[in-house]
Amino acid sequence: IGRFFQPKPLAGQHVLVSAGPTFEAIDPVRGLTNLSSGKMGFAIARAAHEAGAQVTLVAGPVGLPTPRGVGRVNVKSALNMQKSLDLLLPSATVFVSAAAVADWRPAQSAEHKIKKDGSGAVPTLSFVENPDILASIAASPRAKSGALYCVGFAAESHDLEEHAQAKRKRKGVPLLVGNIGPATFGQDDNALLLVDEQGMKELPRAPKLVLARQLVGEIARRLTS
Ligand code: CTP
Ligand code: CA
């Protein structure tokens, strides 16, 4: 039997997924970014669409193709990402924050390309903290009332379980997904640790699309229970 006969556990849901890195401009030609590939977020968007949801991806700068049937908005900075999400959130029922949002941005972005002045002097960069997009969305009335189900991600280098549970509480989300093991950025495989109020569950190493389908199943189960 083909996909036509597959169950659609997310039918009627509108899933919003943020994915990829953000790019924080220093000047018109330079900026600060990170090594997030966007693969996990894109796989989740694809899996959510397969599960019958209407899906919108808000993607930082990545070269990945848009999964079939998924809507996409491209963004650069964390502030751009927050603005796009805010516009899409009123109709969303699930938000999966898979993006690797830059924690800081340059305090100011130069209007023109910064030039060497010939003296060997180097520019000084100062930073300001970006808003915590997930935490602010999780604190919104729709999230608080249960109309919007929020899922966070966490990349931790050590003591994943402890850090993931602490991060889940700090962000105020019902479900937080930890990446197990170092350097999953850019890999096709991953392993995930799901933490919620009940405790934790491991999704062992597998291709990101397989994990994304499992995660979507876990989310669907939590929406109906
Ligand atoms: N996140 C966000 N906005 C930020 C930073 C993070 O929405 N400014 C989201 C990420 O998309 C992810 C979750 O918060 O779903 C956790 O991100 P992470 O970088 O692990 O946590 P931080 O709170 O930034 O803490 P730290 O990087 O110091 O561990
Ligand atoms: Ca961070």
Image (cartoon, grey):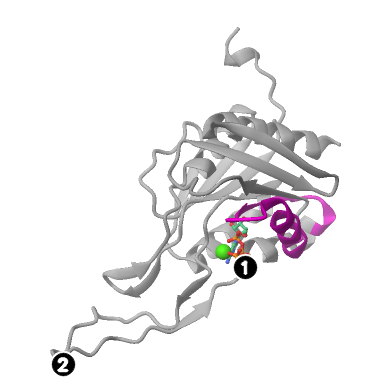
Q: Residue at x 13, y 89 (%)?
A: 118
113 and 201: which is toward the camera: 201
- SS under mark 2: loop
Residue 100, labelled with which disc? none
N-terminal of the two: label 2 or label 1? 2
Q: Residue furthest left?
A: 118
Does 47 sit left or right of 61 as displayed? right
Cα–Cα span, label 2 and label 1:
39 Å
- SS under mark 1: loop
Q: Amino acid at mark 1?
A: Asp
Q: Residue at x 73, y 35 (%)?
A: 218
Task: Kindly identify which residue carries mark 1.
Answer: 132
Q: Amino acid at mark 2?
A: Ser
Q: Is residue 10 visible?
A: no
Percent across and percent down for residue 76 are: 42, 61
Q: Residue at x 58, y 33 (%)?
A: 205
Q: How many marks?
A: 2
Q: Single out the mark in the foreground, 2 or 1.
A: 2
Percent across and percent down for residue 44 are: 57, 38
The residue stretch that appears in magenta:
144-172
Task: Characterize the local packing of mark 2: few (<14), some (14-19) or many (20 or more) Cα atoms within 10 angstroms.
Answer: few
Residue at mark 1: C-beta within 8 A of ligand 1: yes
Task: Kindly identify which residue carries mark 2.
Answer: 119
Quarter holding ligand 1: bottom right
Task: Characterize the local packing of mark 1: few (<14), some (14-19) or many (20 or more) Cα atoms within 10 angstroms.
Answer: some
* Residue 184 in magenta stretch: no
187 and 162: which is toward the camera: 162
57 and 174: which is toward the camera: 174
